[in-house]
Amino acid sequence: MTEHRQKILKSEQVKEIVPRLGEEFVLIENPNYIFSKFDICPLAPKIVEKRDRIVAVVQDMDGTTTTTETLCLHSLEMMVRHFTGRHSREQWDGLDRIRDYPHIIGNSTTKHVEYLIKSYQKDANPESFRRAYLRAAVITMAFGRDKGRKREVLSNLKNFQVAELLSENEVLKWQKTVDGTHEIHLPGEVEKLLDRYAKKLELSSFTDQVRAAIDIYYQRYHEILFYIEHGKSEILRSILPEDDRNLIEPMSGVAVFLSTVKGWLGEELDRFFDEFYRILVVNPNEEKSSLILSEEKLKAIGRYFEENPIKVAIVTSSIAYEARIVLTQLFKVIQKQIASWKISDNRKKLLIDRFQSYRNVFDVVVTASDSSEIRLKPHRDLYSLALHQLGIAKEDFDKVIGFEDSESGTIAIRAAGIGLCVAVPFSDTQGHRLDYASYVLPGGIPEAMIKHEFFLTEKTLSKYQI
């Protein structure tokens, strides 16, 4: 391949090179504003054999580690309501789990919004959309906590030629009052300004509509995070549907899994056998006999990781601000869970101390802020960054486990060179195509632990059985 470096290749030459790159490839569609409609990327071969050793775990945040995917879906739905002007359930039932969800979970925000704008274009209400955009923009500039997001909003206002809105006396006066406040509000004087500016705002092109819709989405999601950060549960209950009140919780088994692979739980992993068994036997796709794993084997797994702790990375298409709020809140919940575990007092004290901060547990946290909106999942970039920051040698990629809940996430894992790709779908991703993964585990992480023994070989575990 040396002769082809640093030169323009003709299609005939590319045909010669492609077979050397792999046997499976994926065609990744780029956002609307990118020159190349598609990128073509080779995939690591699937690994279905157990490993003699595991060196690292990389996992998505929303859907495999925590339950916050629901908040993202809610924010996308609110964006569509503003785009169409159908604000009530009577006017529109909301996003369709079967039709819409596979296209709005796991990709970049741009890809999600592009799909929704195209899908609901026939129902667009320009007046509602323009006003909602301006409202989201001024609220973000006043209350936003992420500098990158505020830069994007300001850039869009300038591109839409309405940036002078921020210089209006009513806006400047209001912005001086928001520092230190824990409730988002918009005065009547500013509301009237939005009506006036909305009349001269043009969002005619598809690209402009996507830009504006992204700002609406982020403002809603960040508003929720703002109230979570400040403990304003009473406000959240008034703006979220009733079934969204359990906002941030760990996915089933996550706390035990992390405690185990970091080497902190040891042979006391066996204390969770009954709990995991109950979780898995309710899965109608499994035979009970296939789930029987002795408590002694669990002890052996715990001993293995106690002697061979591994590195763990969180990889998310969320921006850094979002990940910080979500993971901080998540670990508060995990600490409460650990306090109720039936393990030794010394072990419990150790774990509660370690889980004081997600930085104590995750060796690397890679977010959308580390890359670009145009290179998020299903592109490999975030997972490649994680492997690099973890210090994993390329020859050890086959000893890394990658957990994802979505189609685009599983593609990104394999595109980064991780063949042991494990899909752990939950209710909102059941409609995703997950055949890119080496394993699809409806029982989630507990199934990976009990049924698949952390993907370790019998030979390896036999050394740790007493």
Image: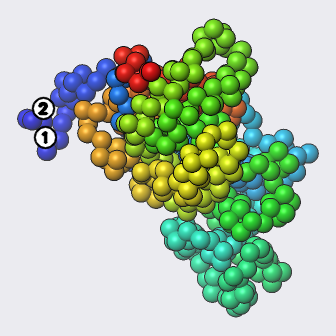
Among all residues in the image, which is located at the extreme right?
90
Q: Quadrant of the N terminus?
A: top left
Q: Which mark is residue 1?
A: 2
- The answer to which of 258 and 41 lies nearer the viewer is 258
Whether residue 194 is visible, yes or no, is no
Kind of element beneath mark 2: loop
The colour style of the image is: rainbow
- The answer to which of 71 and 309 lies nearer the viewer is 309
**Which residue occupies 66% across, 74% down?**
143
- The answer to which of 247 and 30 lies nearer the viewer is 247
The answer to which image quadrant residue 19 occupies is top left
**Which residue occupies 68% across, 25% down?**
274
The answer to which image quadrant residue 310 occupies is top left
Q: Is residue 384 left or right of residue 198?
A: left
Disc 2 marks which amino acid? Answer: Met
Q: Which residue is the site of mark 1?
A: 5
Q: Is residue 389 left or right of residue 466?
A: left
**Labels 1 & 2 near each other (Cβ < 8 A):** yes
Q: Quadrant of the C terminus?
A: top left
Disc 1 marks which amino acid? Answer: Arg
The answer to which image quadrant residue 65 occupies is top right
Kind of element beneath mark 1: loop
Whether residue 357 is visible, yes or no, is yes
| Residue 27 percent across, percent down from the top left | 41, 31
**Which residue occupies 67% across, 38% down?**
342
| Residue 117 percent across, percent down from the top left | 65, 47
**Which residue occupies 53% across, 21% down?**
296
